[in-house]
């Protein structure tokens, strides 16, 4: 395998990408990218995807019925084990 | 795993419903961004201790803090609202049963996600999907592998990706890739945390995430050829 970053093939560069991205090392500074439009485009796409993923957080809130079912099941368990019963308003 | 914090362990316990337990619970699930309830955000130790001691109000607050993330994970993994609701319910019931075993060896959120992931994977196995085990999830078939980029057409994604388009593309990912992508890029967990959740190496987590992103790139470029630039 080539060790000189400038002489690195696309395959070698891309094999190292999983370690570059998110490691604190800026892969955009890698010498291979200076002359490789293909890998520059790939890196830009992967960074765009990772950035876009943040849009998906925090996602969807479950309906109140989920908590009601959880609470009901907990209380049922308590009755079996002799615990007290009661209710708590569905958390918001 | 010998760690008593493992979600695979079960512990039966009794639960107490205090005399004032009809009091409403304060809103607590209003994250403005990931960091507000992200993996790095520690759960209030006092709240956790109360929940571990059987305080139902405290448990309800933990539910309120984490319900959105757990439900979203379930929904994205099974793609069905009713199933996701059932899985969320099961995950929190398991949490209720096992919370006393949590020792704080990992972040609570990490521990809870591991528990929820096990619930999801069990459901996927019941459905007889190709995802039989986590090992298999981490080693998708050759057909699931992303295409290599060397020699590929020089087309790149446009600068912005529509949320719904991305959501659809994520839904089409093989389950193992989808899980890693959600945990890292959406939820913001670190590779060491994911490795702990999934019993895999950090290198494996990085590698699978990279493949997931490559697979998404393929899907997004295929969906939006007009959004590509030459």
Image: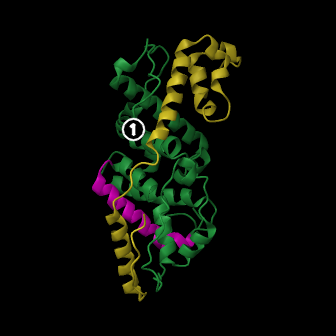
Chain colours: A yellow, B green
- Please say whether residue B97 is one of the residues in the magenta stretch: yes
Query: In x, y percent, where is residue B3?
Result: 60, 64
Residue shown at 70% from the left, 19% from the top: A3
Question: Can you tell which quarter of the image residue B164 is in?
Answer: top left
Residue shown at 44% from the left, 77% from the top: B23
Q: Classify residue B120 as left or right of residue B26.
A: left
Task: Pick out the residue farthest to the bottom.
Answer: A82
Compared to B79, does A70 lie above or below? below
Task: Pick out the residue farthest to the right.
Answer: A4
Mark 1 secondary-structure assignment: helix
Residue shown at 39% from the left, 23% from the top: B221
Question: Can you tell which quarter of the image residue A21 is in?
Answer: top right
Residues drawn in magenta: B79-101
Query: In x, y percent, where is residue B128?
Result: 30, 51
Residue A30 seen in this snapshot: yes
Closer to the camera, A7 or A62? A62
Q: Quadrant of the C terminus of chain A?
A: bottom left
Query: In x, y percent, where is residue A17?
Result: 59, 28
Residue B10 seen in this snapshot: no
Q: State the residue position of label 1.
A: B170
């Amino acid at each position: 395998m080539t060790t000189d970053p400038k002489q690195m093939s696309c395959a070698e560069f891309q094999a190292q990408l999983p370690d570059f991205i998110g490691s604190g090392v800026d892969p955009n500074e890698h010498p291979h990218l200076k002359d490789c439009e293909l890998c520059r485009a790939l890196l830009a796409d992967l960074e765009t995807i990772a950035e876009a993923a943040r849009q998906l957080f925090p996602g969807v809130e479950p309906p109140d019925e989920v908590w009601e079912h959880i609470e009901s099941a907990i209380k049922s368990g308590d009755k079996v084990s002799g615990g007290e019963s009661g209710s708590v308003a569905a958390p918001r | 795993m010998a760690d008593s914090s493992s979600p695979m362990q079960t512990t039966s316990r009794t639960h107490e419903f205090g005399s004032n337990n009809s009091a409403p619970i304060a809103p607590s699930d209003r994250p403005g961004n990931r960091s507000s309830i992200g993996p790095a955000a520690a759960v209030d130790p006092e709240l956790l201790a109360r929940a571990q001691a059987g305080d139902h109000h405290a448990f309800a607050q933990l539910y309120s803090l984490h319900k959105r993330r757990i439900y979203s994970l379930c929904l994205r993994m099974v793609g069905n609202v009713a199933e996701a609701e059932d899985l969320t319910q099961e995950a929190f019931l398991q949490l209720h049963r096992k919370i006393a075993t949590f020792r704080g060896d990992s972040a609570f959120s990490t521990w809870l996600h591991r528990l929820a992931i096990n619930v999801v994977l069990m459901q996927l196995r019941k459905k007889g999907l190709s995802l039989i085990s986590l090992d298999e999830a981490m080693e998708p078939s050759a057909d699931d592998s992303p295409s290599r980029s060397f020699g590929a057409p020089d087309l790149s994604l446009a600068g912005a990706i529509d949320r719904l388009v991305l959501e659809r593309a994520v839904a089409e990912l093989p389950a193992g890739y989808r899980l890693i992508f959600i945990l890292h890029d959406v939820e913001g967990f670190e590779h060491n945390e994911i490795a702990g959740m999934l019993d895999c190496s950090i290198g494996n987590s990085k590698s699978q995430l990279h493949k997931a992103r490559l697979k998404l790139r393929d899907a997004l470029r295929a969906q939006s050829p007009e959004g590509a630039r030459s």
